[in-house]
Amino acid sequence: MDWESLKRFWRIEVMGGEEKKLQFKRIFRRIRQKEQEHYLFWFRLAQHFHRRPKGLINYPKMAQRIHASLLRTHGIDIMLGAEIGPGLHFAHRVGIVIADAARIGVNAYIRQNTTIGVRTGGPGRLIHIGDNVELGAHVCIIGDNLQIGNNVTVGAMAFVNKDLPDNSTCYTRHVATINTK
């Protein structure tokens, strides 16, 4: 991620639109007032530092410190190696865990207590999630080399371990059984 793409992320996610002019005074005012924008600003900066080589300044260590601070402050654990397109949005910033093997497209909408992770570690184990995907509360996406298409909606409390095609809806049926004494 270079400086221009970092500014693009900030324009879209912090300022509210790609056409908006990037003014640091306005950015800092927004990140002081709004928690989601605060998280996204510092997360994108940490990703930028994470991808820079270690030189005179230890950028990866700075990135890890920012990430640890965000985890304590917001309760969101998105690994810095995860690739997430612009337009990331959280309904509630609680309990979100995304592994570094995740590749998520633009305009992802993620609700609380969502987990995206790989079953086994190693190279080539990726989870590809397309553009305009909406993930409900308590969604668990676990597997190796999963493909979730574009314009997919995953319902609340769904468990996904198989590929999902474009323009689909996925949910898990939960049946409550009540026994009387």
Image (cartoon, helix red, strand yellow):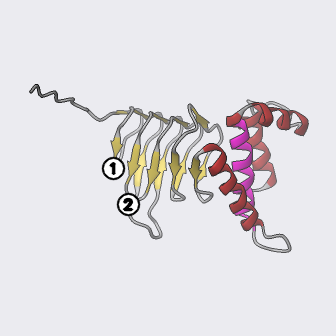
Give the residue at mark 2. 119
Question: Which residue is the extreme one toward the front?
Answer: 181
- Residue at the spot 35% in from the left edge and 47% down from the top edge: 163
The residue nearer to you, when weighing 1 against 115, is 115
Contact, CB < 8 Å: mark 2 with mark 1? yes
The residue nearer to you, when weighing 150 against 114, is 114
- Residue at the spot 75% in from the left edge and 52% down from the top edge: 45
The residue nearer to you, when weighing 29 against 119, is 29
The correct choice, above or below, for 63 with respect to 20 in the image is below
Q: Quadrant of the N terminus?
A: bottom right
- Residue 50 in magenta? yes
Could you tell me what secondary structure mostly forms the magenta stretch? helix
Give the magenta-colored segment's residue range: 37-52
Q: Quadrant of residue 54?
A: bottom right
What's the mark number on residue 161?
1
Instruction: Name the kind of residue labelled 2 in the image.
Output: Arg
- Residue at the spot 41% in from the left edge and 32% down from the top edge: 167
Percent x, y of residue 115: 45, 47
Callout 1 crowding tier (Cα within 10 Å): few <14, some 14–19, many ≥20: some
Percent x, y of residue 24: 88, 39
The tag earlier along the polypeptide, 2 or 1, is 2
- Residue at the spot 46% in from the left edge and 59% down from the top edge: 126
